[in-house]
Amino acid sequence: MNQVSYANIVAAAQALQGVAHRTPVLRSRQADAASGAQLHFKCENFQRAGAFKFRGAYHALSRFDATQRLRGAVAFSSGNHAQAVALAARLLAMPAVIVMPGDAAPAKLEATREYGAEVVLYDRFAEDRAAIAQRLVRERGATLVPPFDHPDVIAGQGTVGKELFEETGPLDYLFVCVGGGGLLAGCALAAAELSPGCKVIGVEPQAGNDAQLSLRSGAIVRIPVPQTIADGAQTTAVGELTFPIMQRLVSDIVTVGDAQLRAQMRFFAERMKIVVEPTGCLAAAAVMNRVVDIRGRRVGVVVSGGNVDVARLGG
Ligand SMILES: *Cc1c(COP(=O)(O)O)cnc(C)c1O
C-alpha cells in the first residue's frame, strides 16, 4: 500500500513517542510586525540530529521486520537524512550504510560517522547516487530508506504538522519548505485533518523551482541539480508518492532567493536566538518577505532544520 493517510501519521506519532523531541512552537513580536501576521514557528532545528528527518527515518526503520533489522538500512542523502538514518539505526541497534556527496558539509559527514554509520562518498554532479545505493542493497541485502518518497517517511514527517496544530489549533496558512516533498506532503495531510480550512503553501529556492513547475503544469518536472545555499532542497524532482498528495492538498508553491535566505538566517540568530540552516529558512523567508498576502492571518511556519556548517557561514 503506497497510500498515506492521517491514520499513518497517528501511528508514526506513537512510534516516535519518547524517542523524537516534541519541538517547541516559538513566537516573535518582531517577526509578526515584519510579516503583518501572527506567526507560529515549529522549530525542528531542535529535533534530534538537528532536523525533522529523524521522524521519518526512525518511523521507517522501526517498521523493519527481523531480517531487515539484521541486514540494516541503506540511505542516500545530501546530509540531514543521512544523520537521521544513522541515529535511528543506532537507537534500533541495526547497521546503516549512507551514500553521501563528497562535497556535503564536513560537519554533516562527520556527524553521520559519529552516529556509527558507514559512509560511502560519491560525486554529486557526475554519479547516480540511487544506482550506488541499489548496488549496496543487492550486495548486502540491506533495505533502502528513501529521503522522501516512502509512505512511512511521509507519515513520520507528518507528525511535525500534527504537533503544530495540536498546539496552535486551526491556522489560516501553513508554510513548509519543499525538497522532494516528504515534509510538505505529510504536513498537508495533517492540516487536512486537523485544520481543514488551512491553506498549505510550499516554499522552494528560486534556483530550483521544480515543485512549483510541477504543481502548476500537473506533471512532475525534472531539473538539473540547482545551485543554491538551501542544500536540503537541491532535489531535481518531487516524488511519485509526494506529488499526488501535493496536487490534492497544497494550494501553491512559492519561491525565495538565496539573499532572502541569508537575511532570514541572520534574523533567526540575532532576533530569535536560534540557529537555522539555509533550507530551514525557506518557509520563514516567504512569510517575512510577504510573498503571499497573509496580513492579519494566523500562520504556521515550519523551521525544518538547524545543521549549519559554521565554517561555511562566513560574514
Ligand atoms: C530534507 C530537508 C528539507 C526538504 O524535505 P523534503 O521532505 O525532501 O521536501 C527541508 N529542510 C531540511 C532542513 C531538510 O533536511
Image (cartoon, helix red, strand yellow):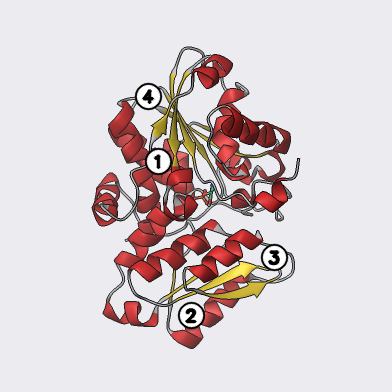
- Which badge, 1 or 3, comes first in the chain's sequence? 3
Q: Label 1: which residue?
A: 187
Give percent across and percent down for residue 225: 70, 55
Label 3 is placed on what type of residue?
Arg
- Which badge, 2 or 1, comes first in the chain's sequence? 2
Task: Decide: is 145 above or below 51.
Answer: below
Task: Decide: is 58 above or below 164.
Answer: below
Q: What element carries label 1?
A: helix
Label 4 is placed on what type of residue?
Leu
Residue at mark 4 to residue at mark 1: CA–CA distance: 13 Å
- Which badge, 4 or 2, comes first in the chain's sequence? 2
Q: Is mark 2 on a helix, strand or loop?
A: helix
Residue at mark 4 to residue at mark 3: CA–CA distance: 39 Å
The image's mark for residue 171 is 4
Label 2 is placed on what type of residue?
Val
- Give 67 or 121, whichever is nearer the viewer: 121
